[in-house]
Image (spheres, grey):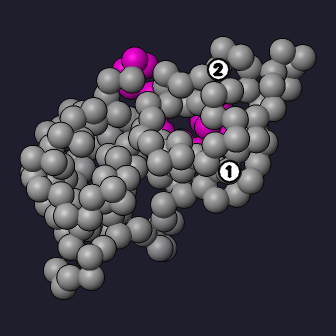
Amino acid sequence: MTSKDHRIAVTLNGAETELDAAPYETLLEVLRREQLHGCRESCGQGVCGTCTVLVGERTIASCIMLAHLADGERIETVEGMGTPGDLSVVQQAFVEHAGFQCGFCTPGMIVTVTQLLRENPSPTDDEVDHYLAGNICRCGAYPEIRMAVRTAAARLRGEDV
C-alpha cells in the first residue's frame, strides 16, 4: 500500500474485508489483484459485460467503476456464487446446456443471469434478451444461454426440469 492508496471496507463474496485501492483504480483492477479472475477485462469501456459483478443488488461493469466508490458495499463475483464441487443452479444450467463456447464471457453472464433471476424468477425470452443486452458473447452461444436461463429459472421456482 502506498501513501496514496485508500483502504475500502467491503463485504466480498460474503466475507467482510478491507482492500487497498488507489484513487484511480477500477474495481476490476482491485478484484483481480485479490486473485478474483472471474471478472475479466475485454472492452475496458463497460460495454461487453465480461467484467460484470454485483455491487449491492446492481450489476456493474467493474472496468469503469472506481474501486473507492464500492466502499461499504456488498460485492459478489462469480467466485462467490459456487465452487467446482458445488455449482450454483445458474452455473449448473450453463454447464448442462453448454451456455458457453470459449468461456470468456461466461462469468459475467452468470453474474447477470443470477441477478436477473433474483429480480424476476419467471422471465420471458424477450426479458432475458433485454437483461443480457450488456453482455456480449463473441462465440454466439445465445440460444444455449437462453436455454440455461430457462432451466435455472424453472429449478429456482422448484419445478422439475
Q: Does residue 137 show up?
A: no
- In this rendering, the answer to whether 126 lies above or below 47 is below
Q: What element carries label 1?
A: strand
> Would residue 30 be found to the left or right of residue 80 on screen?
right
* Distance in Å between CA atoms under marks 2 and 1: 18 Å
Q: Name the residue under label 1.
A: 11
Who's the residue at 50% across and 31% down the image? 62
Can you give x and y, in whole percent of width and height, for residue 86 in the image?
A: 47, 73
> Would residue 101 be found to the left or right of residue 25 on screen?
left
- Three-letter code for the amino acid on which mark 2 is drawn: Glu
Region in magenta: 29-45
The crowding category of the residue bearing disc 2, from other C-alpha atoms within 10 Å (few below 14, some 14 to 19, many at least 20), is some
Who's the residue at 38% across and 35% down the image? 50
Q: Is residue 88 highlighted in magenta?
A: no
Count of marks placed on residues: 2
In the rendered structure, find residue 25 and report the number of the disc placed on it.
Answer: 2
Q: Does residue 131 show up?
A: yes
Can you give x and y, in whole percent of width and height, for residue 100 in the image?
A: 24, 50
Who's the residue at 26% across and 76% down the image? 157
Can you give x and y, in whole percent of width and height, for residue 139 in the image?
A: 18, 38
- In this rendering, the answer to whether 98 lies above or below 9 is below
- Three-letter code for the amino acid on which mark 1 is drawn: Thr
Can you give x and y, in whole percent of width and height, for residue 131 in the image?
A: 24, 42
Who's the residue at 18% across and 85% down the image? 160
- Quarter of the image holding residue 108? top left
Q: Is mark 2 on a helix, strand or loop?
A: loop
> Would residue 78 be found to the left or right of residue 147 on screen?
right
